[in-house]
Image: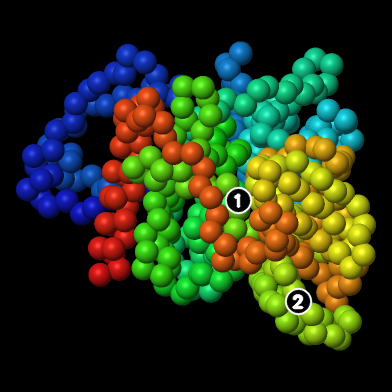
């Protein structure tokens, strides 16, 4: 609706009309203007006129039908119908295909948080659906003349570097969660520093960590947590730093900035996260027998089914049931060392005597077989057949960087140590 402002007499006298003819009609209307004498202007009363003009209907251009892309994430409790509804898909055939077709099974199994992209026509018909399956493959479901078809494409991966810092307030896992560190990277952190720091006994409130790690992305979605590139852990005021280096033969490991291996020949603990329920002792009241006897090992309390790892490279010398140990695995290392893992609920699939195992391999699962009052892992560390306290015995180091690799090591890791120093200084400045 147009509004007419009151014009002053002076402005009315200056008003002049002109004649113009539009060379092209506007919405099919030809507008004409004429010159009115000045005396007629003053005598004419202005009126407001409102008129509805019917616009011609929009005719789509052939071959240019509009389509729309919409993004959604899978929510807890979602059904196929609900997810399609949020993406404004109104297509019975597409809904039936996604609910029942074997080729769309990966769509029905998508984890909470997974992103889905849908291309639709103006009337809500599904033209294409794209997503990353739980295994990281790209899935494309497209409409064709004969219905819908699904294609599996290899993921287009890109590597991104992430940096996280955290402070211990209760447990390591709580601190890594608070810092936003993915669980696989948190497990790596515990393994890397596990030879120097006993996370069951040595962890203190106020300890800090800094981590630089890789993440693999496909179509903007994270698909896999990669390797830690460099990290620092400050435990009870002492700083431990590591960098990852891969030599010419393709073997990679973690070293201190000056080239010493941080990997011990033995892990300090066979479990990633648990608590010591009973330590090494020459005299302990047995919880089942009720008698005083030596306990020449360490008990780690953990839920039944927790994975038990072999603490060093070695050869399995016994797998089976043995008296109070219940289900037990014994592994020999380097000729003079032996480790024992007792009260297991079950063994790793296919584990047998004479099998070579590598440090960190899963050999069994926590249980309470044999003489056990609750679920835990009994762990022994022997040197020349004599039990030693695994929490206190000095563990041998792995080999350092060789002289021929020293220059390559420094060139490859200098940027990592500089980045770690920058992160550490930034963290300290923020604390101050």
Left or right of 201, for residue 303: right
Residue 29, image x and y in percent?
42, 24
Instruction: Say which quarter of the image contains residue 62.
Output: top right
**Circle 1 crowding by C-alpha within 10 Å: few under 14, some 14–19, many from 20:** many
Q: Nearer the viewer, residue 350 or 282?
A: 282
- Mark found first going from the N terminus, 1 or 2: 1
- Quadrant in the picture for the C terminus: bottom left
Residue 69, image x and y in percent?
59, 33
How many marks do you count on the picture? 2
Name the residue: 32% across, 52% down. 423
Residue 220, image x and y in percent?
53, 36
Q: Is residue 220 visible?
A: no
Which residue has dot 1 on it? Answer: 266
Q: Nearer the viewer, residue 421 or 138?
A: 421
Q: Nearer the viewer, residue 232 or 160?
A: 232
Instruction: Say which quarter of the image contains residue 60.
Output: top right
Name the residue: 51% across, 61% down. 197
**Real-space Cα separation, disc 1 to disc 2, in angstroms:** 24 Å
Q: Secondary structure at mark 1?
A: loop
Name the residue: 23% across, 44% down. 44
Which residue has dot 2 on it? Answer: 294
Residue 151, image x and y in percent?
74, 21
Q: Secondary structure at mark 2?
A: strand
Instruction: Say which quarter of the image contains residue 278.
Output: bottom right
- The colour scheme is rainbow
With respect to residue 366, does 125 lie above or below? above
Disc on res. 346: none
Q: Is residue 155 visible?
A: yes
Callouts 1 and 2 close, C-beta under 8 Å: no
Q: Nearer the viewer, residue 22 or 69?
A: 69
With respect to residue 258, does 430 lie above or below? below
């Amino acid at each position: 609706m147009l509004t007419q402002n009151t014009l002053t007499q002076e402005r009315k006298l200056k008003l002049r009309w002109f004649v113009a003819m539009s060379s092209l009609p506007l919405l099919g209307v030809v507008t004409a203007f004429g010159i009115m004498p000045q005396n007629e202007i003053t005598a004419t009363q202005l009126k407001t006129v409102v008129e509805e003009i019917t616009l011609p209907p929009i005719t789509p251009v052939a071959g240019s039908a509009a389509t729309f892309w919409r993004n959604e994430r899978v929510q807890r409790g979602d059904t196929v119908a609900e997810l399609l509804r949020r993406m404004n898909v109104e297509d019975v055939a597409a809904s039936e295909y996604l609910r029942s077709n074997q080729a769309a099974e990966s769509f029905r199994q998508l984890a909470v948080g997974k992103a889905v992209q849908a291309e639709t026509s103006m009337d809500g018909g599904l033209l294409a659906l794209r997503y990353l399956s739980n295994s990281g493959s790209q899935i494309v479901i497209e409409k064709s003349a004969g219905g819908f078809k699904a294609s599996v494409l290899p993921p287009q991966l890109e590597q991104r570097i992430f940096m996280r810092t955290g402070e211990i307030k209760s447990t390591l896992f709580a601190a890594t969660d608070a810092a936003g560190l993915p669980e696989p990277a948190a497990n790596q952190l515990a393994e890397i520093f596990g030879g120097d720091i006993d996370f069951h006994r040595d962890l203190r409130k106020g300890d800090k960590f800094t981590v630089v790690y890789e993440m693999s992305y496909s179509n903007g979605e994270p698909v896999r947590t990669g390797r830690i590139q460099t990290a620092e852990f400050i435990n009870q005021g002492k700083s431990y730093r590591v960098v990852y280096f891969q030599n010419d033969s393709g073997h990679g490991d973690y070293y201190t900035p000056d080239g010493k291996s941080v990997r011990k020949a033995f892990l300090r603990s066979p479990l990633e996260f648990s608590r010591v329920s009973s330590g090494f002792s020459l005299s302990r009241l047995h919880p089942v027998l009720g008698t005083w006897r030596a306990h020449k090992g360490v008990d780690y309390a953990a839920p039944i089914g927790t994975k038990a790892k072999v603490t060093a490279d070695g050869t399995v010398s016994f797998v089976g049931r043995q008296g109070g140990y219940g289900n037990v695995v014994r592994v020999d290392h380097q000729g003079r060392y032996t480790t024992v893992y007792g009260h297991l609920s079950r063994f790793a699939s296919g584990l047998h005597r004479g099998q070579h195992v590598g440090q960190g391999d899963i050999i069994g699962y926590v249980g309470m077989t044999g003489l056990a009052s609750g679920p835990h892992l009994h762990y022994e560390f022997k040197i020349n057949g004599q039990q030693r306290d695994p929490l206190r015995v000095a563990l041998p180091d792995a080999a350092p960087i060789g002289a021929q690799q020293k220059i390559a090591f420094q060139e490859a890791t200098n940027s990592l140590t500089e980045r770690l120093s920058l992160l550490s200084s930034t963290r300290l400045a923020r604390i101050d």
